[in-house]
Image: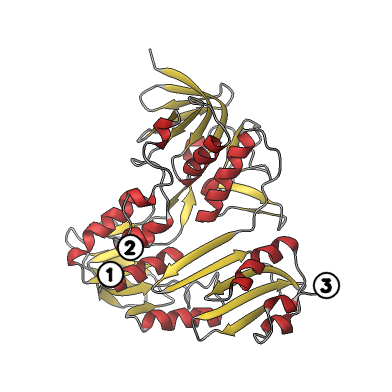
């Protein structure tokens, strides 16, 4: 007879949503024995940003990046089941079937299965020393392999590629970045911003090969070279692939829930089943600030939605309202971004984009919809999310005038 048990709340996925939801639930007075977390990972919930920064660089320990101490879950009567796979989801019967046949029933379920890296589909992609970076074990595997590496190839120019390239370069490894676009992070950076970052990386020894892709990885067992679509061949003894992620929906694909670029939820992060929510990278939610559907793959979203679903489980009834935000650290630079620039009709740079201190503001009908800041005064950082949430109208000319405080650009 198979093992069967029940928990009031079950979180499917042991990532950041689970860690922050558990912490919030405890703070809200959740009783012992009322929460179970089912995780395929082999580690208690941890922060993901250090995996491509401090932990990868060897500055952060495994203990330092845990969201809660390892004994937190046992102390608060939370059943944290690691290295467990779910083979079936029965929403009508309100139960999950685990590999091995055991079952766990629930009153409320939170789907927080996250995302997985997109895989490079070329000959040689399965050679040794070809890495992806998503989990703690991924980051540790890259870190442990660095000792004798001399030439690294980083495929992709998004924030993971940029962060990994910076860490490797600072360890004295010759790094080449291969970008499909004609400039770095074209989807996000303005041409001026791309130029700044390309120059910054180049002066620190990182080579960029743009407007091409990898055709083949070669080597006898371990990777030793890469052939590019532009005809170039380059030696490399380490490859890190950062070409995006896709939401992990396999486990709920046949559950009856709507799946469309993730698990579709409303502004309360609820699925069509009111007892089932989704949060984090896997959740395709209704953004009430921008009036559009959105799926976000960043730390701040996972934290905020984890905390939000905890409050919702405990009875709070308010829409999830949050300005999209992310940050990054590369070399000695730190930058932040808020909002959504996709519908902008005007952009303003504040400061000198050829230096490491500037901000960029995206407007739509004179309202602030997105902002990027790097080494700027706190007043700019503080204004950005407030203005985006409120749809603040500003004067573009005054906003670009750095001789005046940023608040002087506000149109009353």
The percent position of residue 243, horizontal first and vertical second, equals 43, 62
Q: Rounded to the nearest whole Å, what is the CA distance between mark 2 and mark 3?
A: 49 Å
Q: Residue at x 58, y 75 (%)?
A: 377
Say which of 154 and 72 sits in front.
72
How many residues crowd around disc 2 within 10 Å: few (fewer than 14), some, or many (20 or more)? many
Q: Secondary structure at mark 1?
A: strand
The residue singled out by tag 1 in the image is 152
Say which of 376 and 150 sits in front.
376
The residue singled out by tag 3 in the image is 412
Q: Rounded to the nearest whole Å, what is the CA distance between mark 1 and mark 3?
A: 52 Å
Q: Is residue 84 above or below residue 329?
A: above
Q: Rounded to the nearest whole Å, what is the CA distance between mark 2 and mark 1?
A: 8 Å
Q: Which mark is residue 405?
A: none
The percent position of residue 403, horizontal first and vertical second, equals 66, 87
Q: Quadrant of residue 122?
A: bottom left
Q: Residue at x 71, y 73 (%)?
A: 363
Q: Is residue 219 left or right of residue 231?
A: left
Q: Secondary structure at mark 2?
A: strand
Q: Residue at x 54, y 67 (%)?
A: 336
Tag 3 or tag 2, which sits nearer the N-term? Answer: 2
Tag 1 or tag 2, which sits nearer the N-term? Answer: 1
Q: Quadrant of residue 59?
A: bottom left
Q: Is residue 317 left or right of residue 114?
A: right
Tag 3 or tag 1, which sits nearer the N-term? Answer: 1
Q: Which mark is residue 240?
A: 2
Q: Residue at x 62, y 81 (%)?
A: 349
Residue with the most extreme right position: 412
* Residues under numbered marks 2 and 1 in contact, where contact means CB atoms less than 8 Å apart: yes
């Amino acid at each position: 007879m198979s093992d069967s048990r029940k928990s009031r709340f079950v979180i499917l996925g042991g990532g950041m949503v689970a860690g922050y939801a558990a912490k919030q639930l405890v703070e809200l007075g959740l009783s012992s024995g009322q929460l179970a977390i089912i995780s395929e990972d082999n580690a208690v919930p941890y922060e993901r940003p250090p995996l491509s920064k401090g932990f990868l660089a060897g500055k952060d320990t495994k203990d330092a990046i845990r969201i809660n101490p390892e004994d937190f879950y046992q102390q608060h009567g939370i059943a944290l089941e690691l290295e467990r796979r779910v083979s079936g989801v029965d929403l009508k019967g309100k139960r999950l079937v685990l590999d091995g046949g055991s079952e766990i029933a629930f009153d409320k379920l939170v789907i927080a299965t996250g995302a997985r890296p997109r895989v490079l589909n070329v000959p040689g992609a399965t050679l040794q020393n070809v890495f992806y970076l998503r989990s703690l074990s991924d980051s540790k595997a890259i870190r442990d392999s660095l000792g004798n590496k001399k030439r690294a190839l980083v495929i992709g120019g998004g924030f993971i590629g940029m962060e990994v390239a910076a860490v490797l370069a600072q360890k004295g490894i010759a790094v080449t970045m291969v970008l499909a676009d004609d400039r770095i992070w074209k989807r996000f950076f303005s041409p001026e911003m791309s130029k700044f970052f390309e120059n910054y990386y180049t002066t620190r020894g990182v080579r960029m090969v743009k407007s091409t892709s990898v055709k083949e990885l070669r080597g006898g067992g371990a990777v030793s070279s890469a052939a590019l679509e532009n005809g170039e061949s380059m030696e490399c003894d380490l490859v890190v692939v950062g070409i995006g992620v896709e939401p992990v929906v396999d486990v709920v694909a046949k559950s009856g829930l709507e799946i469309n670029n993730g698990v579709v939820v409303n502004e309360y992060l609820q699925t069509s089943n009111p007892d089932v929510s989704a949060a984090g990278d896997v959740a395709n939610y209704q953004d009430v600030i921008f009036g559009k559907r959105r799926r976000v793959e960043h730390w701040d979203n996972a934290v905020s939605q984890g905390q939000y679903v905890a409050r919702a489980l405990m009875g709070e009834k308010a829409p999830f309202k949050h300005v999209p935000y992310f940050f990054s650290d590369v070399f000695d630079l730190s930058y932040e971004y808020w909002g959504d620039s996709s519908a902008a009709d005007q952009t303003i740079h504040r400061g000198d984009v050829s230096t490491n201190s500037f901000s960029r503001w995206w407007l739509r009908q004179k309202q602030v919809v997105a902002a990027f800041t790097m080494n700027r005064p706190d007043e700019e950082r503080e204004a950005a999310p407030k203005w985006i949430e409120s749809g603040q109208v500003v004067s573009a000319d005054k906003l670009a005038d750095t001789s005046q405080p940023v608040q002087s650009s506000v149109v009353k």
